[in-house]
Image (spheres, rainbow, N blue to C red):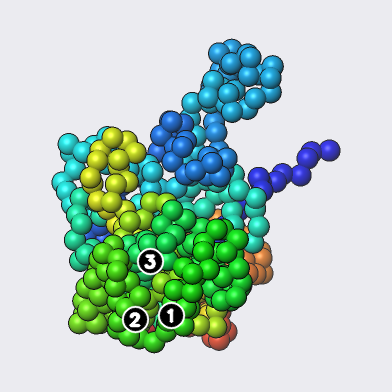
């Protein structure tokens, strides 16, 4: 008995409706990227292992899918490591390539490798799949798409302003109104850590602060104490726990809190610039919000940090994020090339649009007209008409077999095809077509031009 086929855990098949909906999101994002001047690039699905390894920390390295060398991969293996069962020593000798973990490191590699051919500032976008050997769970997959846009070679804050506008443009086009674009700045977090005497515990401090809305003020303070942050320093944070109000009012409060930190004041200055520009330019449907607890990507972000939240009432993690990094290409030897970038969370955006019923009906537009097949003569006559319908932008097809009419009609119903055309000897002789509306049940004998007009309505 043949084994029932299956797919690896953490991967998915997509049916025609799901692919159409995903393409709707892809095309919307791609169109906005290009409107804003971003150029598309693509990188290989797999890279040399040394390009990826060591760039994501120990946890990230464990999640990289390694590819075994072709041929007799054990022939050149480290036999001592094999006998010792030491995978860390064995892996490099049996695997020299790996599936890409994200699009950012391959992009940094691309910029360094092609630096003499690139015109800086370089605005690129990339929409490709990535792979992570993560434990599959709801909303987390081993294969998924990333939709990234980055600018490298410019330190101008106008880039951050444009990325906020880009987010607003995409979500407005998707009719996803009411998203919140949260923003913070690494310099502000560094400044706060400096003020409370915890500069050497920046990561511990921010990890705890990031949990404020989840575990509350008291638990955050307890965690900070457990990480070795002094009570005196935590007391200085009190104004931060009650920070609220408009962007401007939060900025003013931060100026008081960070008055003794040059780094912190620089971060405030950058955020104020961005807020003033967005206030002057306006946003269509999104809201810009300052969130001093936002600390994603702290290992490589050096300035602005972005995170996009779904509209209120929708329980979903972030649907986008990004930030400024001042030396990403430095990992490959090209120093002092500043960049800033954002990413769209395709799968989460899909779930939000589905929950809010925001996919347009036209997204699932399939065949609009099915011609019933009564035989070879009728089929040939029908295909001539189908060519003209297709030339007019109408999706049309001929049922391939001269099967019983009931079977062909059932096929049209199951595929939700709105119109069916019947062509018999009488229609051929009179050069007409019998058009049946599968929704209303009405049918009329009409000429081809009238058929085209009726279906197009």
Residue 321 lies, with reference to residue 254, above or below; the image says above
Q: Is residue 379 left or right of residue 406?
A: left
Give SS at disc 2. helix
Q: Residue 381 occupies which quadrant of the picture?
A: bottom left
Q: Which numbered disc covers residue 253?
A: 2
Q: What residue lies at 49% left-to-right and 38% top-to-bottom?
A: 99
The residue labelled by disc 3 is 195
- Location of the C terminus by quadrant is bottom left
What is the C-alpha distance between the residues marked 3 and 2?
A: 14 Å
Q: Residue furthest front?
A: 232
Image location (x, y in percent) of residue 183 = 37, 70
Image location (x, y in percent) of residue 244 = 42, 84
Q: For this rendering, which residue is in front, 189 or 408? A: 189
Label pair 2/1, CB-CB below 8 angstroms:
yes
The residue labelled by disc 1 is 239
Q: Residue furthest right?
A: 1
Image location (x, y in percent) of residue 14 = 57, 57
């Amino acid at each position: 008995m043949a084994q029932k086929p299956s797919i690896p855990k953490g991967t998915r098949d997509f049916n025609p409706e799901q692919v159409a909906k995903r393409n709707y999101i892809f095309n919307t994002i791609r169109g906005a990227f290009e409107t804003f001047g971003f150029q598309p690039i693509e990188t290989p699905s797999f890279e040399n292992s040394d390009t990826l390894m060591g760039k994501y920390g120990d946890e990230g390295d464990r999640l990289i899918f390694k590819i075994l060398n072709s041929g007799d991969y054990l022939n050149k293996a480290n036999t001592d490591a094999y006998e010792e069962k030491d995978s860390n020593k064995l892996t490099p000798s049996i695997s020299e390539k790996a599936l890409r973990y994200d699009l950012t490191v391959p992009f940094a590699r691309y910029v360094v490798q092609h630096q003499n051919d690139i015109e800086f500032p370089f605005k690129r976008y990339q929409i490709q799949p990535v792979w992570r050997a993560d434990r599959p769970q709801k909303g987390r997959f081993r294969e998924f798409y990333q939709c990234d846009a980055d600018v490298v070679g410019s330190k101008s804050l106008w880039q951050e302003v444009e990325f906020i506008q880009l987010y607003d443009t995409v979500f407005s086009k998707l009719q996803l109104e009411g998203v919140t674009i949260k923003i913070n700045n690494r310099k502000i977090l560094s400044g706060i850590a400096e003020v409370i005497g915890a500069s050497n515990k920046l990561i511990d401090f921010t990890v705890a602060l990031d949990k404020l809305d989840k575990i509350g003020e008291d638990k955050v303070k307890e965690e900070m104490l457990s990480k070795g942050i002094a009570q005196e320093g935590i007391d200085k944070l009190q104004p931060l726990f009650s920070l609220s109000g408009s962007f401007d009012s939060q900025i003013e409060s931060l100026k008081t809190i960070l008055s003794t930190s040059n780094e912190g004041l620089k971060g405030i200055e950058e955020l104020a610039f961005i807020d003033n520009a967005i206030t002057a330019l306006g946003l269509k449907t999104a809201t810009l919000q300052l969130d001093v607890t936002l600390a994603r990507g702290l290992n490589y972000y050096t300035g602005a940090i972005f995170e996009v939240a779904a509209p209120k009432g929708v329980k979903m993690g972030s649907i986008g994020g990004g930030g400024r990094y001042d030396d990403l290409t430095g990992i490959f030897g090209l120093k002092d090339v500043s960049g800033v970038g954002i990413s769209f969370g395709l799968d989460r955006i899909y779930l939000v649009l589905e929950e809010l019923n925001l996919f347009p009906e036209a997204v699932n537009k399939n065949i609009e007209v099915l011609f019933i097949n009564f035989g070879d003569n009728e089929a040939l006559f029908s295909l001539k008409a189908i060519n003209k319908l297709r030339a007019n932008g109408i999706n049309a097809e001929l049922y391939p077999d001269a099967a019983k009419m009931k079977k062909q009609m059932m096929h049209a119903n199951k595929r939700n095809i709105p119109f069916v055309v019947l062509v018999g000897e009488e229609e051929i002789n009179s050069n007409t077509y019998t058009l049946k509306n599968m929704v209303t049940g009405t049918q009329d004998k009409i000429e081809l031009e009238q058929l085209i007009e009726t279906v197009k309505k």
